[in-house]
Image (cartoon, rainbow, N blue to C red):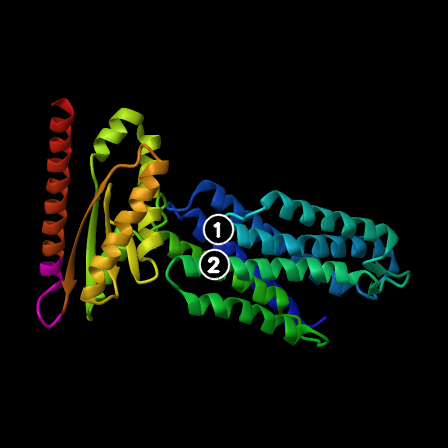
Amino acid sequence: MSDFYSATIFLSVFIMIIMDMLVSGNDLMEHDKKQTVYTISVLVIACMVSEWFGVWMDGADPSLRTLHILVKTIELSTAPIITVLCSDLMTPLKHKKLIYTLIGVHAGLEVLSAFFGFIFSVDAQNVYHHETFYWVYVLAYASGVLLFIGQLLSESSHHYGLYRALVIILPVFFFCGLFLQYGAEVRIMWACSAVDVLMVYILYSELTQKIDTLTHLLNRRSYESRLASLRGHAVIYYLDVDEFKSVNDTFGHGVGDAVLAEVGSTIYAVFSKVGYCYRIGGDEFCVIAQISDTAAEKYLSEFLRELTARRVKNEHLPHVSVGYACFNPVLGSVEDAIKRADRMMYHYKRKLKSEALTNNDTVKS
């Protein structure tokens, strides 16, 4: 066993410790997400140390055979769990119960193989071997990696392609480490895994700083950053939930939160393919759309139709006042466009109130 390999494992363990320290100081991260990262870190360290001991003991004193079997069991049963936990960290897994059941079955098979040697074995001379059903481990691990890649791409796509390059590079980096190790003396797979896990945490942290947790739209910080960098033509929509305070006071904050989430979902459904959707305040939203001036009214009408359809299914969903303005950097500033969109929104809000009062008077008469 080379000193380079030992140094790689040692430094990789330190990468995990550094990540844990970053997580510990992250006040924006939810408690259950922190626990997931800590668990991933412990499992990665367990796999790295187990592999190191396995390499050290391979072909060594036969009296170490039992310990050799133990560390290989830990490594092979644990590795697929890491990929699933990383997937679950990015976004909640669908069919979580089924996935974790399959992972548990695989771990159980690895434990059985420690006694019966059908996936791996350690012979009487303390030499490790892949056996007939080693493909079970390969399948479990590969499935976990593919699940992780799918979750990364899905999460990036949902958030307008943010960090798409990093999302692509992460699995490429991992597979480079895997292929370089295959059939060679260089063992760097777990070092690559440690770096990948750290990058996943950094990616998750970056996304959570840009995303509103209730609506899953971009937050005000992202909105202000986008406005500051806006140089080309755009249509800016301002949206405000009508009578939202009344919803909170009448039905409670739980219903109020559900209303905001539903409004956010409606905005995303209509505008996400043509622009960036933001929640910029309590019941205030904004869209910065890359569309022509002539298309602005079309998307406004589409949003109002979608909202009306959802209001039929959800009796608590109120009206939403909308205003927009076309921004052209040659003709005016972003601030001017925002003021025009804001004025149009409040004009729309007054119009809705006037129509509501007229309808009430008609009903009374």
Horizontal and vertical percent position of residue 233: 19, 69
Horizontal and vertical percent position of residue 159: 38, 58
Residue behind mark 1: 91
Secondary structure type for disc 2: helix
313 vs 271: above or below: above
Taking depth in this image into account, of 167 and 14 the one nearest to the observer is 167
Q: Nearer the viewer, mark 1 or mark 2?
A: 2
Dot label at residue 154: 2
Dot label at residue 30: none
Q: Residue at x 88, y 61 (%)?
A: 123
Quarter of the picture holding the C terminus: top left
Taking depth in this image into account, of 60 and 303 the one nearest to the observer is 303
Quarter of the picture holding the N terminus: bottom right
Whether 144 is among the magenta residues is no
Q: Residue furthest top?
A: 364
Give, as a three-letter code, the residue at label 1. Thr
> Where on the picture, by quarter, is residue 160?
bottom left
Judge whether residue 164 can be spotted in this image.
yes
Side of 101 where 253 appears, left or right: left
Q: Which residues are magenta?
A: 329-337
Side of 26 where 354 appears, left or right: left
Horizontal and vertical percent position of residue 357: 12, 31
Q: Residue at x 54, y 67 (%)?
A: 171
171 vs 70: above or below: below
Taking depth in this image into account, of 206 and 12 the one nearest to the observer is 206
Mark 1–mark 2 CB contact (< 8 Å): yes
Q: Earlier in the sequence, mark 1 or mark 2?
A: 1
